[in-house]
Image (cartoon, rainbow, N blue to C red):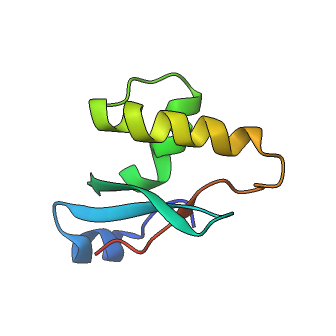
Amino acid sequence: MDRFSEKSLLSLGDHYVYGLIDPRSKQIFYIGKGTKNRVFFVDERYEQGFPLDENETFYIGKSIARLKMNQSAQNPITYLNPR
């Protein structure tokens, strides 16, 4: 899945909470607040050099870079179901 359906977006409302999971340790390393399809673009934005907010820069920037350096992490980010 790379984006929410229109029906899902309507059911999520204006904002939702999401978590990013390290697939090696199964530990949550970031909890964020999203709108629309934001959850799917966090790592993509980081890789393309788009500005991240202060929390994203501190937590996600370091974590994504570390995960991507580990060759065993084929899909370095797992998404928790937004609530």
Image point (55%, 60%), residue name: 2
**Rendered location of residue 50, percent (x, y):** 45, 24
**Rendered location of residue 62, percent (x, y):** 52, 35
In the foreground, 82 or 10: 82
Quadrant for the C terminus, please.
Answer: bottom left
Q: Residue furthest left?
A: 14
Image point (39%, 23%), residue name: 51
In the foreground, 79 or 41: 79
Quadrant for the N terminus, please.
Answer: bottom right
70 with respect to 12 (left or right)? right
**Rendered location of residue 48, percent (x, y):** 56, 26
Image point (52%, 66%), residue name: 27
62 with respect to 67 (left or right)? left
Image point (59%, 30%), residue name: 47
Q: Is residue 6 above or below residue 57?
A: below
Q: Is residue 51 above or below residue 24?
A: above
Q: Quadrant of residue 7?
A: bottom left
Q: Quadrant of residue 52?
A: top left
Q: Is residue 33 above or below residue 27?
A: above
Q: Is residue 31 above or below residue 53?
A: below
In the foreground, 6 or 71: 71
- Figure label count: 0
